[in-house]
Amino acid sequence: MLTSSLAYQRCVNPGCQATFDVGQTLTACEHCGDLLDIQYDWSQARVPARLSDFEQFWGQRSDPLRLSGVWRFRELLPFAPTKFLVTVGEGQTLLQAADQVAKFVGMNAGGLHLQYEGMNPSGSFKDNGMCAAFSHAYMTGAKRAACASTGNTSASLAMYCSVTRLMKAVIFIGSGKISYGKLSQALEYGALTVQIAGDFDDAMARVREVSQDLGIYLVNSVNPFRLEGQKTIMLRVLESLRWRVPDWIVVPGGNLGNSSAFGKAFMELHELGLIDRIPRLAVINAAGADTLYQLFERRRLRWNKGQPDSGRIAEYYEDMTQRGSKADTIASAIEINRPVNLTKCLRALEWMNGVVRRVSDQEILDAKAQVGAGGIGCEPASAASVAGARMLRQEGIIAPSETVVCILTGHQLKDPTATVAYHTTDQDKFNEVLGSRGVTRASFANRAIAVPNELDAIVRAIQMYS
Ligand code: F0G
């Protein structure tokens, strides 16, 4: 029996479609083990007739739930009563036309937009999903919440726990695998931090076991409520474009939560008649963590009406195990070889006529330098989107006249080590941090100038360089 007929959980496998109450805490279908979606009976929801109707709430910013860039769209994710909705002011993000970056990518002026999700309170897009999962955890009476993380999910969870004091955060991280910006957040916000001798994929496997054994609420993106929150990134993109649908959404791919959520968002908007066309999706892997690329582009794995070839996936994973292959990229946020949302992402790629590309660490860092030169900046993983857009432009798949939105998933300050190494004059530092990743040049470096502590020399240097 479902306690709510408005919202319920449903298995994504069309051959199963088992449904579960919205009040249950699940990360997989109890019948077939597949992923779960949140579904709505839209006839019972108060969905506006037009997307522009959301503008009527702009004047209600003194209400924290209408200030929130997630909950101001709550009519499109109505899974919890208002009294359980938690906000820390997430989603005050910016979509900006970036003409210098457009030039680098090969787009016409005005055609390339950057969606700065690093402007969220914990510095990454994760807050969009975390406030939704956290609200669901609160609704179910959870006292502890856990995640495995490459750093941003853990920072976000730790922040929601420390600001609200509603739960204790337990985070699992791979040893030496997360950047200091992210680790410092979790530590300072008081999360119980468990460092596993292994990488993200190991930590993810363990946190699933532990949360099951100890009954701890799991907030990784296998949690379908996370993805409901992440749908709103697309709503804000549309809002910033004054409800015009772009041609392309380009997003880095790690655990594939964003790409899955974006697909769901556009399908729902289309079904509700709120948009008349769906943009194309490009998911960009780092070359050192390219499972989706290998499966989708090389082995032609497809959603296939909900029956993707599981044998082909198992074979690929077994081969990785045999080879002892571990994800390896400077974009540590997406250093993931076993993405938990793989099948949902295949569905999004189908719905959005998507493509997948892989970009090298060199391409990522050059794109990152271009983004940073335009101000605000992003962390390495985020720049994969811009590097990927450039590649698709060069291949002629994206036309210069199209409208492209690249999602910048995390803030520049998350990973200063990579940034400083790129711009450094110290060759040893460069080699240590970047050379080991196959990065050989820093074409867009802005190098500091070294001067003696003498007024004349300082003045001469400034005159020479400015
Ligand atoms: N960009 C950043 C900055 C991220 O932190 C992540 C994921 C991604 C992209 C990939 O997003 O998983 O939706 O495909 N970070 C997770 C974490 C894994 O633990 O913080 P995805």
Image: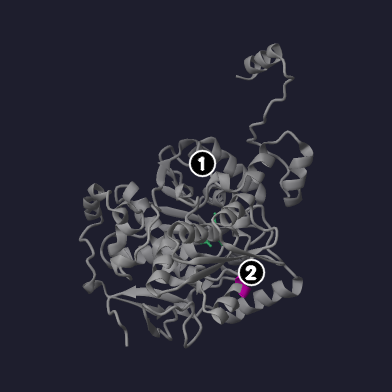
Q: Earlier in the sequence, mark 2 or mark 1?
A: 1
Magenta stretch bounds: 201-206
Q: Quadrant of residue 24?
A: bottom left
Label placed on residue 378: none
Q: Where in the figure is residue 313, as x and y percent of width and height? A: 60, 76
- Circle 2 crowding by C-alpha within 10 Å: few under 14, some 14–19, many from 20: many
> Vertically, is 363 above or below 309?
above
The stretch drawn in magenta includes residue 205: yes
Q: Where in the figure is residue 397, as x and y percent of width and height? A: 50, 53
Return the residue nearer the eye: 372 or 141. 141
> Vertically, is 99 above or below 194?
above
| Gap in angstroms between the C-alphas marked 2 and 1 | 39 Å
Secondary structure character of the magenta stretch overall: helix
Q: Where in the figure is residue 278, as x and y percent of width and height? A: 36, 60
- Circle 1 crowding by C-alpha within 10 Å: few under 14, some 14–19, many from 20: many
**Residue type of the residue flagged with mark 1:** Gly
User: Which residue bears the numbered disc 1?
Assistant: 106
